[in-house]
């Protein structure tokens, strides 16, 4: 029995994908079942992509917050001594 997608973790989804792949590679899936397996795989891949995007956004947010909290390092703004300035 397949677990509800809303309750699955990323790890569970990838494990089920691996099981489906092994079954297809070993010819353990008959033609009648193949369509169902392909549809389920598509759902699992979509779920994994969504979870990865959410994780990426959360990580980006953490880094953005971290960058905002730290004082900016002063840049070295020494005037140029050469004559190649545009202003």
Image (tube, rainbow, N blue to C red):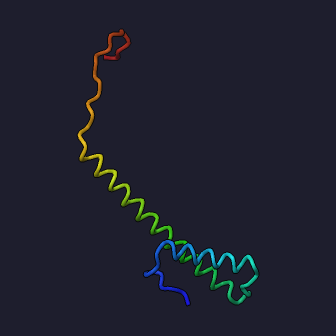
Q: Position of residue 4 (x, y in %)?
A: 47, 85
User: What residue do we see at 32% from left, 50% from top?
Assistant: 64
**Residue 20 as seen in the image, left or right of residue 77:** right
**Is the residue 12 above or below the residue 72 in the image?**
below
Q: Nearer the viewer, residue 56 or 82?
A: 56
Q: Which quarter of the image is occupied by the N terminus?
A: bottom right
Q: Nearer the viewer, residue 51 or 82?
A: 51
Q: Nearer the viewer, residue 83 or 30?
A: 30
User: What residue do we see at 23% from left, 40% from top?
Assistant: 71
Q: Position of residue 77 (x, y in %)?
A: 28, 22
- Res. 79 image quadrant: top left
Q: How many marks?
A: 0
**Is the residue 69 above or below the residue 78 in the image?**
below
User: What residue do we see at 50% from left, 70% from top?
Assistant: 48
User: What residue do we see at 36% from left, 60% from top?
Assistant: 58
- Res. 41 image quadrant: bottom right
Q: Position of residue 44 (x, y in %)?
A: 54, 76
Q: Residue furthest right?
A: 27
Q: Position of residue 10 (x, y in %)?
A: 49, 72
Q: Nearer the viewer, residue 86 or 67?
A: 67
Q: Which quarter of the image is occupied by the C terminus?
A: top left
């Amino acid at each position: 029995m397949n677990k509800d997608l809303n309750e699955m973790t990323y790890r569970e989804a990838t494990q089920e994908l691996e099981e489906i792949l092994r079954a297809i590679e070993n010819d353990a899936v008959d033609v009648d079942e193949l369509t169902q397996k392909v549809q389920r795989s598509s759902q699992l891949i979509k779920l994994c992509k969504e979870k990865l995007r959410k994780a990426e956004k959360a990580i980006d947010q953490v880094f953005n917050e971290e960058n905002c909290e730290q004082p900016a390092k002063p840049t070295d703004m020494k005037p140029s001594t050469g004559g190649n300035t545009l202003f």
